[in-house]
Each structure stands twice: as C-alpha cells, then as structure tokens.
Image: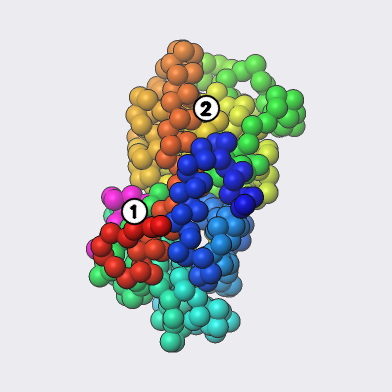
Amino acid sequence: MNRLIFDYAPITGLDVIEQLQQLAKPLKGLRVVHVNSTKAGGGVAEILDKMIPLMNDLGIDTSWEVINGNPDFYSCTKHFHNAIQGNNVQIPARLLQAYERTNTENASRLEAKLRDADVVFIHDPQPAPLLQNIKGRKGKWIWRCHIDANKPNRPVWKYLRNYIAQYDASIFSLAAFAQPMPHPVYLIPPSIDPLNEKNIELDTNEISSVCDQFNIDRDAPLLVQISRFDRFKDPIGVIQALKHAKKFVPNLQLVLAGGGASDDPEGEEVLEEVRLASNGDPDIHILELPNDAHRQINALQSAATIVIQKSIREGFGLTVTEGMWKQKPVIGGDTGGIRLQVINHHTGFLVNSPEGAALRIRHLLGNPQKLSEMGVKAKKFARENFLITRHIREYLTLMLSLVSGTKHRIDLK
C-alpha cells in the first residue's frame, strides 16, 4: 500500500486516492524531472516540495533540479516577471546575455538527466532556454507558467516565446492567461497541501503563543496578508486600506508577513517602502519570516479575522487558498487567479482599491454571521478545487495524453 498518498484519504475521500493510483499505473517507471530556479521561497518551490515525494509514492520516478545563476541572471528574470505581468520594461542586452549564458551553463550541468528523462516540466521563464541546449532529448517537455500572463509586454513575450514554442505543451493557471502556441495548451490551477505544517490544524495555545511573540492582541480584529514583499502584491495598498478602516474600527490590526526568495532581487527595496508607509503604527506588524516558518504562518492565518491578498497582478494566490482552508473569508484583488479562488460575495470579496478593501473589511467586521458563513463556504470550495491531489491528478492526465501520443480517449484498466 502507498503510505504517503493514503494520508490524504481522510480529507479527500478514498475514491480520490484510488483514482490517482489508476491514473499513475500506466506511468509507473517513467522518469520525470521538474526544473525551476529556487528550492525555497515562493509558491513553485512550495508545491514541488510535496509534489515530488507524492509522485514518487505513486510509482513515478520524479526528481527536482534547480538552475544556478548570478545577480545579472536574477535581475533579468525579475524583469521578465514584471514584463509578463504587464509592466513596460526595457531589458539591457547585458542581462539577456547573462540569461542565455546561465541557461547554457546549466544545460551542460544537467544534460544527462534532462536528455534521458521521459517528461520534463520547466517552471516559469528562468529555465526556459534549457530545452534548446539539450541535444537529442528523449522525452516530452512541458513549459509551466505560474505568472499572470494576461497582458504581457509584447517585445519581452516575443523574445521568450521563441524558446517556449519549441516545447511539446504549455500549462497556464487559467484561460485568461493562455497565449497562442503551436502546441497543446493546458489549464491547471496550482494547489495547496492540506498536510503541510502551514495548513494543518493548530491548537489554540500554539496560535496564541505566536500572537504573543509578535505582540498581536487576540481580542482585537486582525487582518493578515502573507506574501513576498513585491509591488504586485500591493502591500502599500493594504496599509492604506487599514488606515481607512481604522477610522471606524480603531483597534483593527494588520500583519504583513513574508519571506524572501533567492530569485527575487527586489524584495529588500519593497520591504523598506512598506516600513516607511507603516510610519511606525504599532497596529501594523511587518514580519520578515524565514522560508520554513510554516507553523508561524499557519498560526497567523488561523488567528486572522479576515485574510487579505490585495494583489494587483497574481498568477494564483496560494495564500488565498491557505486562508480559505482555515475557514477565513478572503478580501482579494480583482485580478488574475484570485478571481478563480474568491467567489465574490460568497467566499470573500474582490476589490480594486484600498477604499474598496476598507469598505469590505468594515462590512465583514460588522456582520459576524456573514463572516462565519463565508468562511465555511471558502473551506468547502478550497477542498473541492485547490488541493494538491487535484493538481497531481491533472498532471498525471496531461502526462498520459502526451506520452500516449493520442488525441483520442484513453481507457484505463
């Protein structure tokens, strides 16, 4: 019996686990490699950290490789990130040369493993040119976009598309992000792991202990936004929303907590902007947490009255689903993947401005029954749509389709 995957049965039901086993059966023994640009920090690393052992548990030989780069490489890929999410950026030729050179060097290091793999998942733009540097590749290569690519900067996208078009398939998180490609395009939203320390149920003493550690008053309403310090997450807008709402709810508190990622060179600069915007308000708690602070993040989200994710661009907010899983209504930016997660007026509210966020905060704090009902709906919606078991099921289905080479129905025994 597979032990790890069966741990999920009490949450998802046994039928879900048996379906995963059935889908994995024809893929047993396949060598699958995932490649991204960081082992820690950010949603991609968090998903892969659990997905790799689960796919191995299902009998698929799965591994995870990380490409190495210098500051010029990460500066270039941060420009890509901003450009794909719609910013008008000019990338110096020096940085593009560093990007291409880094991928050539990493391809040399990873060549044997990637050439012989049956399926390779390349995550986001950082490792995209690896494919063209691996000669005589054996398997199918899939480019996975985790970014809001709804309206990418066209010159930058044209440059990246030259690499991505060579793949056998692409994955985007939702239909609005999908770009025309000469190969099949799949829509697969990301997911959370309900058994991760970030999402398991904590006892009240542990939640209170973490709140005490950060001087958070458990008797006062609490807003929590967990995310990288990134301008697309709009942390300044969240502070503005708090200030508007505090005119009516004076004891309202806010936690802005997040860690850095090795592939994000702008984090420190944005963090300083957030500190300046908070202006020393004792009710605004700006927390820099290490990437493994899962239980602390869990405790903060569990202590929250309302979870916030007021992004202005968002491929998919794992922290949105994490909040929903903890039975919290989420006030999220009306953008990208958050529109898929937050069902407006049912599992939370979608907002377009700090003033709009403040209005919804006041509404929920003034209607405890509504707040509670939304939380119940949010958890149910997360269970049905955004857990890692659904994510793996869709990856297995994709691999079956690509490996079999058929466009017709596949019957499983």
Q: Amino acid at mark 1?
A: Leu
The answer, for residue 64, to whether it is visible in the render is yes
Q: Splitting the image into 4 quarters, where does residue 386 fall?
A: top left
Left or right, residue 338 beside residue 6: left
Question: Which color scheme is applied?
Answer: rainbow
Residue 238 lies within the magenta run: no
Q: Earlier in the sequence, mark 1 or mark 2?
A: 1
Mark 2 — residue?
Answer: 327
Q: Is residue 179 above or below residue 127?
A: above
Q: Quadrant of the C terminus?
A: bottom left
In the structure shown, which secondary structural element does the residue marked by tag 1 occupy? strand
Q: Which mark is residue 187?
A: 1
Residue range in magenta is 171-180
Q: Which mark is residue 274?
A: none
- Residue 230 location, x and y as percent? 50, 49
The answer, for residue 98, to whether it is visible in the render is no
Near mark 2 (Cα within 10 A), the count class, few <14, some 14-19 or many ≥20, is many
Q: Splitting the image into 4 quarters, where does residue 62 fall?
A: bottom right
The residue sitting at 38% across, 70% down in the picture is 403
**In this view, which residue lies farthest toward the front?**
413
The residue sitting at 28% across, 59% down in the picture is 409
Residue nearer the viewer, 343 or 82:
343
- Residue 7 location, x and y as percent? 61, 43
Residue nearer the viewer, 186 or 287:
186
Q: Amino acid at mark 2?
A: Gln
- Residue 250 location, x and y as percent? 55, 16
Residue nearer the viewer, 285 or 175:
175
